[in-house]
Image: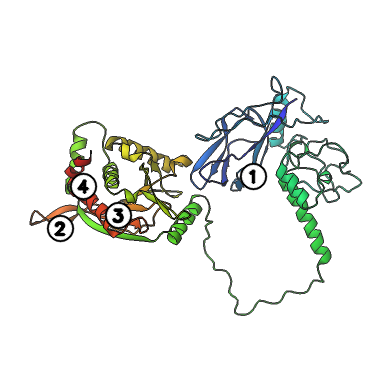
Amino acid sequence: MPQVFEFKLPDLGEGLTEAEIVRWLVEVGDVVAVDQPVVEVETAKAMVDIPCPYAGVVTARFGEEGTELPVGAPLITVAVGAPASGDETEGSGNVLVGYGTSEAPARRRRVRPTASATPAGQLSGVAANGAAAREGTPTAERAPAPGVARPVGTAAGHGAVGGPAGPGHGRDMTPADEEPRSEGPVPVISPLVRRLAREHGLDLRELHGSGPDGLILRADVEYALRAASAQERVAKAPAVTPAPAPPAHAKAAPEGIRTPLKGIRGAVADKLSRSRREIPDATCWVDADATELMRARTAMNAAGGPKISLLALLARICTAALARFPELNSTVDMEAREVVQLDQVHLGFAAQTERGLVVPVVRDAHARDAESLTVEFARLTEAARTGTLRPAELTGGTFTLNNYGVFGVDGSTPIINHPEAAMLGVGRIIPKPWVHEGELAVRQVVELSLTFDHRVCDGGTAGGFLRYVADCVEQPAVLLRTL
């Protein structure tokens, strides 16, 4: 006899509590293999394909595309052939890269045999029924969407899910048609559902669940509670009176295009708002002659080997400056009222994508040379553009490098990427009049800015950091002292 396993939205890590369904990759009735991606979701960090830890036939999907689901909510149910021994099934260990699944619970609910139950070992029949359901053929195995269960005595289109189509199928049911359960186990596996019903005095035996084989879901309990509450309000409601006309001075809601603040845009909005609330930031800036840095890069790339990017050279300068001024590689713990100076430099860099601004993180940037930094910047930038960055690649930064010169602007006062303590901004590098060796000349000039958390250091430290960065830009040989 096949077993039906419920696969829930896994914990995606890094404090993420919900995800939006972007695209379903399977249909009800499809046969799936272990670790086959079944749904594409968007979190506040990135787009993620979620693989299923079970092999079998998809019997139900929960949530339409565009729906936000909390971690732990059901995604799909899968009918799996009976295991070789016992009732135990192991998880695949590979729900998400970097976030493995644990073993499945020791015991699983088995599908109770009914008039339309699939015979043991006949998974092909379940697949056929699922395919028939997609073609419009009525089958008893097809699970309805969550929330369609009705408490006994209310209108419903059918009886318990998974039961045969009886005489009352397809019409309004009455208490005479459908009897409440009086004995036997209640089909509930979630302790949260039991607690919710218990807290509101709801008898689960009087519900028929919308899950596989009549499993009572949280949505079923909430529906029953709403129905009861609505009936109570109707009974207590006074006679209906016409609503008063709105005041003449009342204004309608402003018209225009409304964009929900969710997903990446919502996460960015929350983080920037928090940064502005909590961090007393200040900014200092300086112009620097980048002519020699540009010449040094040209000479490096002409010598053969992999090309070195300008961003990698600026990152190398950043890590050298942080070694001299480690106060800026810190975070503030306000609960302990301590400044925590960090040992490793995990360098974030701002990347603009079609889905919004993201900040990928180069791990252990202080231990990388210019060639390694170039390769990692290229890899993370491509992943950001395609939406395949993992949550771990978008968190844990200790300092951010922001090259807004790519937008054709000279300067900016950026908002610090909370909970970091500083951000170095780099404007466009353009020819400008400059006094060089006592003579007026046209040089490649760049504006550098440093926005810093004034709690971790004073202006002297921030100014010393920025001046060292400018010196390395103007005279790359200065950097050789720290290599």
* Location of residue 423 in the rendering, given as x and y in whole percent from the top left corner: 34, 52
> Which comes sooner in the sequence, label 3 or label 2?
3
Query: Relative to 83, is 160 on the left or the right?
Result: right
> Which comes sooner in the sequence, label 3 or label 4?
3
Q: Secondary structure at mark 3?
A: loop
Give how far apart the Cα atoms at labels 3 and 4 are.
23 Å
Give how far apart the Cα atoms at labels 1 and 4 are.
54 Å
Give how far apart the Cα atoms at labels 4 and 2 are.
20 Å
Give how far apart the Cα atoms at labels 2 and 1 are.
61 Å
Q: Quadrant of residue 286?
A: bottom left
In which quadrant will I find the N terminus? top right
Q: Is residue 302 above or below residue 14?
A: above
The residue that mark 1 highlights is 63
User: What residue type is disc 2 on?
Assistant: Pro
User: What residue type is disc 3 on?
Assistant: Gly
The residue that mark 3 highlights is 408
> Which comes sooner in the sequence, label 2 or label 1?
1
Give how far apart the Cα atoms at labels 3 and 1 are.
43 Å
Q: Marks 4 and 3: in contact by CB < 8 Å?
A: no
* Location of residue 262 in the rendering, given as x and y in whole percent from the top left corner: 53, 53
Give how far apart the Cα atoms at labels 3 and 2 are.
18 Å
User: What residue type is disc 1 on?
Assistant: Gly
Q: Is residue 290 above or below residue 92?
A: below
Q: Is residue 442 above or below residue 301?
A: below
The residue that mark 4 highlights is 472
User: What residue type is disc 4 on?
Assistant: Cys
Q: Marks 1 and 3: in contact by CB < 8 Å?
A: no
Disc 1 residue crowd, few under 14, some 14–19, many 20+, Cα 10 Å: some
Query: Relative to 161, is 285 on the left or the right?
Result: left
The residue that mark 2 highlights is 433
Q: Secondary structure at mark 1?
A: loop
Q: Secondary structure at mark 4?
A: helix
